[in-house]
Each structure stands twice: as C-alpha cells, then as structure tokens.
Image (cartoon, coloured by chain):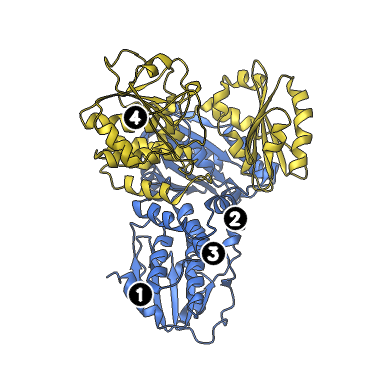
Chain colours: A yellow, B blue
Amino acid sequence: MNDTIRSIATIMSDLDDILIFPHVNMDGDALGSASALCLALRSLGKNAYVMISEPVPKNLDFLECGCCTSDDSVLEDVQLSLMLDCNGLGRIPGREEAWARGRLKGCIDHHATTAKDIRYDFSRIEPKSAATGEIIYRLIKDLGAEITLDIANCIFAAITTDTGNFQHTNTTSRSHEIVGHLYKVEGFNSKIISALIYDRRSKEALKLESAILGNLDFYADGKLAVGKVTQKLLKEFGCTMDEAEGIIQRIMSIDGVEAACLFKETEKNVRASLRGRTYANVEKAASRFGGGGHMLAAGCSFDLPLEQAEKELIPALIEVV
Amino acid sequence: MNDTIRSIATIMSDLDDILIFPHVNMDGDALGSASALCLALRSLGKNAYVMISEPVPKNLDFLECGCCTSDDSVLEDVQLSLMLDCNGLGRIPGREEAWARGRLKGCIDHHATTAKDIRYDFSRIEPKSAATGEIIYRLIKDLGAEITLDIANCIFAAITTDTGNFQHTNTTSRSHEIVGHLYKVEGFNSKIISALIYDRRSKEALKLESAILGNLDFYADGKLAVGKVTQKLLKEFGCTMDEAEGIIQRIMSIDGVEAACLFKETEKNVRASLRGRTYANVEKAASRFGGGGHMLAAGCSFDLPLEQAEKELIPALIEVV
C-alpha cells in the first residue's frame, strides 16, 4: 500500500539524520528532487545529505547545492535511508553499504516498478506523477518547510526535464499547477534554469547533430527516418556518445515521420533508439531483438556491425509504420 | 484606461454579430485567441467570424476551426469589430473596410503598443500577459461559455507559441495555471497540439538547418556565433526563408554563446536576427543600423551585399558580448 505524503511527512519530522539516494545515471528529476528535499530538511534543522557515487552531469551542476557527498561516513548515525526517483538496490550501485546504514528505509518514486530486494518502512509510488519532483514539492509543503529559490529551481529542473519541457504525455494539470506556484517564489526565473539545463551544448555536439540530421535515410514514403551516430563521426567531431542526446527528438520533428530510429555505434555493440509518433508501435519492433520500452519509445541492441543491424531492424520498423 | 474583462464580457453578452481581427502574419496566439473566442461566442448563440486576408500557416491549420473568412459581407450587420493580439489599422492590412463596418470597436491585446488611428469603445491591454490567449481564456469564462476541447486546443496553442513552449521570460504563474486548467478538459492532449505546431517541418528545412548550424562562425572567444541563410542555400535545399524559423534558437543553445546573429539574405536585402543570452544588449547593436527590438532579441536590415553587412554588424556585436 502507498503511504500518504502527510504520513511520510509526519515520520520524517521526527527524524534528524537522513541520507537521500537518487538513482545512478542521475537526471534532472533524480538530482533535483534529492537536493530539493535535502535543502528543505536542512532548513528544518536536520542533517541531510544526497549520497552519490558518480560525478554530477555538467548541465545539472547547479542542482548540487552543496547537498551531495560520496562519503559513507558523513553521518554518524543514519536514522533514514530514502530512495528517490528509483526503487531497488540495482538502481544505487556502489552505495549499498551506505544504504544499509539507515535504521529506517523509505522510498518515494514515480516509476511503476516494484523492487523485491528491499523491505521499506514506508513508501510512496505515484506512477501518474510526471516527475518525482512533484511528489517532493508536496512533501516539502507538508513538512512545513519554505519553498526557497534554490528549492524552486531544483523542483523546476525535476519537472522540466522529466516532462521534456512540458511536451511529453506524462505532463498533467498538476505539473503546470506546481510550476505555477514556483513562479511565485521571489527571484524565480525559469529561463535561467532552462538555459543552464538545455543551452550549454558544445559547438562540437551541434556539428555532430548537424552532420547526422543532414544525412538521414528515409523509408516507407518518408514515414520512417533513420540516423546513425558512428564511431567515425564521434571521432571526426571529438564528441562522446552522450552528446548525441536529443537528436532523435529532432528527427521526430519532420513532417510525415511516424517512426524514427537512431543507431548508436558504441565500441562494444550497436544500440538503436526508437520513437513512434502516434500509431507506430516501435516497442513491437524492438522486442523482436530482445529490446523493450513503451509503444512510442523503445530501444534494442545488436552484437552486429552497424550495416547488419540496419538490415535486421529496418524491415521490422517498416512493418510498424 | 483599461476596461476590465468582466465589463467587456458584459458588453459582448449583449451583442450578436461580431467580427474578430487577428494581426497580419498571424501566429499561434493571434489565430488561437481569435478562434477560441469565436467558438465560445458561437456556443452562446452568436454570429461570430474571424476575418483574415491571408492563408492560415500550415503548422496552424488546425486552429482554423471553421471560424475564418475573408468575405467582408459574411455578416449583414456588424455590431462589434474586435481587434485581437494587435492594435491599430496597420496590423490588419486589407481588412480596413470590414473593420469599419463594426458599429462598436474593441481591442484586446498583450502588446504594450498604443494605436492612435482608432478610437475604441472598449479595450484591454495586458502587457504582463504572456499571450493574448490568457486574456481570452478569462474572457470566455466570464462570458459563461464552456471551455470545449477545440477551445482548449486554441488557447494552448496561443500560450505555447507565444511563450516559446514556456521557455521565454514572459511566461508567468498564470500561464501555467491556465494551461493546468486546460488539462482538465475532456480529451485534451497537449502532445498532439505541440506535435501539430512544432513537428511538421519539411525534410528540406531540417537539411537547411543542418547546413547552417554545421557552418557557424564564432567570434570573441566563442561568445558571438554567426550563421547565414543565403539564397544559394535556399535554392540548394529548395526552401523558402520562413523555413529558417527557429535556427537562431538552436544557435543560442551552444555553451558559452552570449549573442547569436543569423543573417538572412533575401532577394531585396540582408536582414539580421539577433539574440542575447543574459547581458549582451543586441538591441544596441541593431539600433546603430536603424533596427530595433528588445535588449535580448532584436533585428536590423542592410541594403548591402551579405559580406559587407557582416563587416558592418559583426564588430558592433563583438562590442556588446
């Protein structure tokens, strides 16, 4: 059963020493939610830290807010270990020992997963919330903490990243209502936060993207568009694969494209990111090759050279457009 | 003095035959606001039309909603001519005669302009509203009309386009609050509307963009980025200049870029679109060449070949970054 936010606030009000665990490969929602809650707890006089085991991504550096540590012994006594925006030990690799130190265990997440490896003392899973940041916003209010400018920035970052800047279908009335409240916080400027997150791409990444978008292949009367990030291109522009982020959304902006595929040639294998617009069930195509995802966003990988991966996947995609 | 929305609703409640005039070069706010109000008025049993004198842009075709006409004589008697999202006869060229037919004249706008060529019977100018659609949403509520799905789509289109999908600094708490209400309308799906507006670019436009973004020039340690849409490129990709829309925002997404300039070589002259990120006062540079705008978004034009326009403008831009 889901605990209520109010009951979780009541439990946490009595605790003083809290470690917060966002998921590995942290994103704006994981880190933004974790820092927002950490700052709120500190404002109430508690000792709180965000436990991480990897560097903060560059475009999210402003969400660190002095909250993050990799030091297991930062708290002498840990009254609560709280998993945020994830569920299960597999999502916090390298931090299992720190996690185990919490005398109580809690989980707040918006992913519809169930972890069987942890027995929580309390948990709240809200699959209909677009971002964990939406749950944390309400928790902070119930804790009686003030929504400061730093907290507002963290919550905004959580919501804007997980909703694809309010464009994904997970966006709800409440997403907009909460963001509407953030605008009332003194000094809040969403433009600054958006620019920090979205507008710090390298010149090289933009050139890489241009090279890929300038060389798309089209199939099925233009309903299927296929792009390729090759090792050769990465070397040519001095980019890493994570700089290809966002290219598939650009492909989807083309008129008439019902499905997009972006092949990513890594050093080990070939991964394919897939998107559908309205009816193209790309998960169906991905699942044929051991991949998965949702109907309109899926992926799979191949232990084959790029050309052969194309020969396997493209016919399967043509079938669904 | 600004009339209140409530008093405007009271006046309009007593009128039956209404023509609505969005501005020329209609955008999502102009057409979305006009169609939303037209549909609401019709739902109240009134005769209402949106008067236009140009084709509806392709990416906004779904906002037409059976409201638009270019037929001056569509109404026998016009009780009200209402200017929407603009102010002044100069903004409704080719429709002056239809405008003159209204026995009452009204204006609802969010631009901080004053027109001296019209005496309105009522007007409401809200420069702090991100979109005229926000004013129209409240007017429709005050008129007592239902926010139907079509109206919700029109209002959403108005707000998302004028706020740059909630990214521009004009976005307010109320913008998000209103959009939050739209999500409660049965069947509302912002993703579908966003896709209609933003995701119907031609392959050729994307190739044009890639060619331009792959060939930017950088000055002042990368703080100034300059792109060029030449006639040669337009011909090469079979594009028109309006398909270069949005490229300057892409240039602004590059890390370290404080100001961006996109030269547009038309058949007549060279236009320059300018953007600043935080401190670069591009209006100052534009004003030197007879242009204008705001501090962070401005433009100017040159009756010179492209190379010479560059030689004039780039040093002025380097000074402001």
Q: Which mark is residue B150?
A: 3
- Residue A89 lies, in percent from the top left, at 47, 21
Question: Upstream in the sequence, badge 2 or badge 1?
Answer: 1
Residue position marked by numbered label 4 in the rendering: A35
Cα distance in 3D space between marks 2 and 1: 31 Å
Q: Residue at x 35, y 51 (%)?
A: B172
Residue B316 in view in this figure: no
Q: Nearer the viewer, residue B41 or A78?
A: A78
Which disc is residue B59 wearing?
2
Disc assigned to residue A219: none
**Label 3 SS:** helix
For disc 3, the chain is B
Q: Nearer the viewer, mark 2 or mark 1?
A: 1
Q: Mark 2 falls on what kind of element? A: helix
Q: Which residue is mark 1?
A: B8
Q: Alpha carbon of mark 2 to alpha carbon of mark 4: how far?
A: 40 Å
Both labels 2 and 4 in a single chain: no
Residue type highlighted by circle 3: Asp
Name which residue type carries label 4.
Ser
In the picture, measured across the screen, residue B173 lies left or right of residue A277, that is: left
User: Residue B160: image x %, image y %?
Assistant: 47, 52
Q: Residue at x 47, y 38 (%)?
A: A162
For label 4, count other residues whose C-alpha is less than 10 Å away and answer few (under 14), some (14-19) or many (20+). Answer: many
Question: Does label 1 lie on the same chain as label 4?
Answer: no
C-alpha separation, residue under disc 3 versus residue under disc 2: 16 Å
Question: Quick one: label 1, few (<14), some, or many (20+) residues within 10 Å?
Answer: some
**Is residue A19 depicted above or below B165 in this figure?**
above
Q: Is residue A113 above or below residue B282?
A: above
Asked which quadrant contains residue A191, the reply is top left
